[in-house]
Image (cartoon, rainbow, N blue to C red):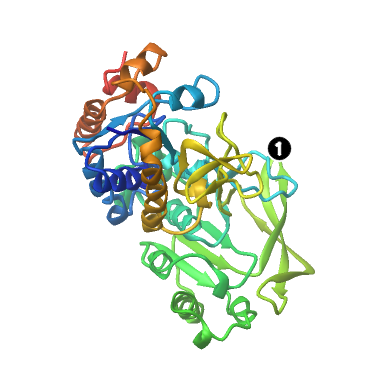
Amino acid sequence: MLRVAVVGSGPSGCYTAQSLIQRDPEVHVDVLDRLPCPYGLVRYGVAPDHEKIKSLQGSLRTVLEHERVRFLGGVRVGGPGGLPVEHLRGLYHAVVYCVGAATDRRLGIPGEELPGSWSATEFVSWYSAHPDAADAGFLRGVRSAVVIGVGNVAVDVTRMLVRGAAELRPTDIPQAALDTLAASGLTEVQMAGRRGPAQARFTTKELRELGGLPGTEVTVDPAELALDPADPGALPAGPRRNVEVLRDWAARPATPAARRIRLRFFLRPVELLAEGGRVAAVRFERTAPDGAGGVTGTGRYEDVPAQLVLRSVGYRGVPLEGLPFDPASGTIPHREGRVLRDGVPSPGEYVAGWIKRGPTGVIGTNRPCAKETVTSLLADAPALGRADVPADPVEALRAAGVAPVSWDGWLAIERAEAELGARLGRGVVKLADWDTLLGAARVP
């Protein structure tokens, strides 16, 4: 019987576990996560008003409830206070690392560290109740915000900034975040990209949601759309539909609204400007198409006032102590999912998901990625299965000072969140800090 540890309980981890149990009738899988809650970015990265995507938790739940799969939350692997990779490797015949891309890319411009300048990842973690997030006063004194980036995460945070309490109250957003967003004095959000609308990375479905927000006007500058030389008729379907939506908004007459979203293009951030010790504006350089799919600077600048700046320019993997890491790509070196140490496959060590291929694709992209890794692992299984490993790794984990949160512990957290929602007159409301989560899970 093969025992496999999967580190990470997001989509890539769950799809890896699912592929293993489907293809090997005897394998047993422990899915480890440093958080006491499963589902990764489906729980902590999907906006609370996106119920359809969040419903994916149901299919991931089916995997984690399988009789040959066991969820072990609250297990930190690598780093300070974490279980050493070498120790974990000795507890299982194989370990698959599905740890995602845990940080964000930087702009690399002056002023990026000013108070009021944040990554979109930090803002998303706050309104998603990630226990590592803190109320950093994101919206305190904020009248206008700039979101740098034109992907789906940028659209998400832009939408959340202008959402009203009536739309957010039925969701599972934590109460403190709901109260803060409801009391916000923000009236304008500008979302800016350095290239044109034809190169924007958001999907048309996400984009259109901005146009249906109550009390919010969406504006697009026709002159910025005209800068893009791309022929909409020659574009792939997604970008073509995006351009069509943007042109429709650009042609509409202005209407009075309590809040406004401005979609901006051909603007490259070059500096964040300060006033009173915190961010007060973003200095952009106007760009122009270079004829090769990129842009070039024009030497013309525009300062956009903002007391909040959120950068949304991509995720990035981080090193996991004890494993090799490629800093250029932000991934763990691998060959068909097998971890490479000095260019040679390391027996029993595998990767899947973003830490394997980089932060690309959609949730479903993790399925074939996981399948490839599992194919490699099962091909290696005859040799891996000869290793002597503990009959029950949980006992060894406890002996090492780790107190895993069981699936029953997670179910207790779910009940506590439902009870909190009932007390607040809402539906399920997420618990937002470590002590409350672990207390609900009844972990000593």
Q: Is residue 443 left or right of residue 372?
A: left
Q: Residue furthest right?
A: 299
The one nearer the camera, 254 or 97, is 97
The one nearer the camera, 429 or 352, is 352
Q: Is residue 35 left or right of residue 306?
A: left
Residue under circle 1? 277
Q: Identify whether 43 is placed above or below 368.
A: above
Q: Quadrant of the C terminus?
A: top left
Q: Residue placed at 24% from the left, 49% from the top?
A: 59
Q: Quadrant of the N terminus?
A: top left
Examine the rendering and report whether any part of residue 139 can be seen: no
Please tell me whether mark 1 sits on a helix, a strand or a loop. loop
Q: Is residue 252 left or right of residue 310?
A: left
Tell me the kind of residue under disc 1.
Gly
Number of numbered discs on residues: 1
Percent coordinates x, y for residue 367 in the rendering: 36, 54
Percent coordinates x, y for residue 39 in the rendering: 34, 41
The one nearer the camera, 120 or 6, is 6
Q: Residue placed at 56% from the left, 73% from the top?
A: 197
Percent coordinates x, y for residue 164 in the rendering: 36, 52
Say which quarter of the image contains residue 43.
top left
Q: Residue placed at 42% from the left, 54% from the top?
A: 369
